[in-house]
Image (tube, grey):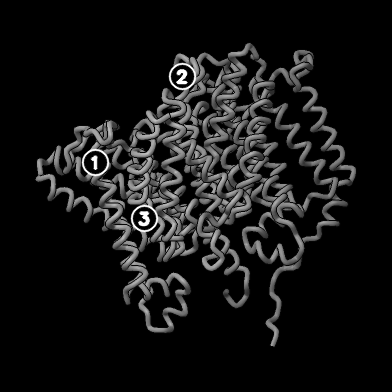
Amino acid sequence: MKAPDHRPPRFDWDGMRQRLVSPFYLVALVAIVVFAAATAPWFPAKSLPLSLLSPWLLAVYFPFSVVFASVYLAFLLGWGNRLLSPFYFAALIATFVFVVLAEGDPTSYFALSLVFTSIYITLALAWDFSSGMSGYLNFGLPFFFGLGAFVTGYFAWGGQHSIPFLLTVSLGVGALGGFLFSFPTLRLRGPYFSLLSLLLPLIGLDFVANFWTQLGMPTLGYYDLPFLAPTPGAELVILSVANGFLLTVLYLLRNSHYGLILRGIRDDEDALSSQGIQTFPYKVVAFTLASGIAGFAGAAYALVVTFAGVDTFEFTFLFLPILIVILGGAGEIAGAVLAGYVGILAYQYTLQAFAGLNLIVFTALAILLVLFLPRGILQPVRQFVRFMRTPEGG
Amino acid sequence: MAGILAPILIYGTLFGLTYVLIALGFTLLFGISRVLNVAYGALYMVTGYMVYWLVVELGFNLLLSAVIAVGVAILVGVAIFLLCVRFAPDPLRFLIVSFMFALLLQYLFSYYFHGASGFIIPSLIPIQGILVFGVSVNPVYIVTSVVALVLLLVLWVWIEWTEYGHTIRATAEDPETAALFGIRVRRVYLIVVVVSSALVALAAVLIVPATEVVPTMWIEPFVIAFVVAVIGGLGNFKWTLPAAFLLSFSQEIVAFEYPTSSSLTDIVAFGVAICFIVGLPRGFGGLLRESA
């Protein structure tokens, strides 16, 4: 006998879309765009009553209104059912809220720790997109992070001080490195690939620690790099907008056909192959993209601390992203952002009080998480919600 | 030419046999239980730190401390393995948990010794260099090589020729069928973990006095073990010796070609591993059809 279906009826997406293109919403969209234009840096804001708002709010509002307007446009294009997930919105709003909170005192320790939190979140997004979704654990993340930092240092010492150029070239070199590494090695299945990628940061560490001075470099890295932005608050705006953009793109990719196949690779790669799907190009593209993002994060880190050194190859830049990805649920792009603000902020604030000991506590926490809650902290919440929704109680 | 041939031959042979001792436990464990244990390298570190702590800080007898250190390493290895197998049985989660255990142990030792590193531990063997065919060699590596050869032979006889060896091989072949035939699969795994941990701990007791005790010392034995395992064909116990020789000789040749760059060894290891994965994914073991 077939069990009766007690699930709630599916949401009426088409009706939602029609409501979204109603005149009221269109007026709201125009208002957002006008407000965005009015708060743009090049607009003479003094002539408007907007100047009553504090300048930092205007500085934050402009980029975020661009992100929100893009999301709204995505709704109109019919991607609403992908973007209207509560997790995605919670993650996007958290990104915005933390920037606004920090702008109250843009040079504080809070703003600075949020800057580092944002960099870890970027890394976590990269890791979640490649490894959390496909199940191919990429331990080579710190290598591409360090690669981005050193590329930034190399070009900055070569006389290039344009921040967008440095960020872009690090992204490109990271992606190239990721492609060159993943093309031969993604023939390996699962654990073998992971172990081989684990060798990458070790090589990077070894190379810089032992060869750097022989190449005629005075210290173990490039120092005196330009700042990403004048204050931590301004750095936070740049990194948060990048994270919001990355979150949107990766979330759309996750829910697209491409993301479906990536998640299928994690579940059963052989079944996909037997359906005639060549999984190899999907994996290579995912790892190339993730390595590029890691390179970008490395460049941002180097420009924040104004030093590209051997510490960028450390495993801290591997296990903290992994910790927050698992905390938020592997393969859920938005979960990594939400968990990142909780986990990394806690890490930053325990860093001074218990130096060294907090690293031990967080590693132990990560071990417990992988052992007992491998699907993330939201897993029991989801189970509870499902339990409450079903009439007969589970 | 003849001038560099002797050192390459001697160092290549000695380091190759040392690599055999380091990689033996990893290959054995992987061949039987099919899990990649990153914490394997951490046991090497645990042994080194235990010997340092017992001998230098507490003033114990060296031989006694070595025995205790090996025992502690076995206990830690068994504990990590059992925890992982019980709660994270699939290979990927096993890998990630064992990696985090290695990091945890690294941070623990780093914290306990207040970030200080570079400890020297006393050796059971004199470490003054002796001349072999005009080449200065540390006796530590000669003794390690002999021990490695003996243990390789003992393990080979144990796995291939004894009753219990058949049991172990049956478990490696198919654990479920083996269990149907009355083999206690968990006990076999346990014994293999104990042997594997003991091997790497013994390697640490022998080799670490020639180097130093630092919190990141788990990385090198792990890299060696993994690359040797890849070259030999993962889990293919019989090819450990040729694989280790291939690695050590290629490292020595590069080291003599570029004498100023002291630490190309890891990069050479990585390159060799990549070459094998691209050209010969099953390693040496894949050359023979019967073992494929």
- Quarter the N terminus of chain A occupies: bottom right
| Subunit under mark 1 | B
Viewer-nearest of discs 3 and 1: 1
Task: Indicate whether A89 appears above or below A272.
Answer: above
Few, some or many C-alpha atoms within 10 Å of disc 3 (few <14, some 14-19, many ≥20)? many
Disc 3 on helix, strand or loop?
Answer: helix
Label 2 amino acid?
Answer: Gln
Few, some or many C-alpha atoms within 10 Å of disc 2 (few <14, some 14-19, many ≥20)? few
Is residue A30 at all visible to an observer of this figure?
yes
- Which residue appears at 71% of the width and 76% of the height? A5
Q: Which residue is mark 1?
A: B140
Viewer-nearest of discs 1 and 2: 1
- Which residue appears at 70% of the width and 84% of the height? A2
Where residue A100 sits in the image (x, y, percent)? 60, 30
Label 1 amino acid?
Answer: Val
Q: Tell me the CA gap for discs 3 and 1.
A: 18 Å
Give residue B24's mark. Answer: 3
Total marks placed = 3
- Which residue appears at 62% of the width and 37% of the height? A95
Give residue A214's mark. Answer: 2
Where residue A373 sits in the image (x, y, percent)? 48, 58
Label 3 amino acid?
Answer: Leu
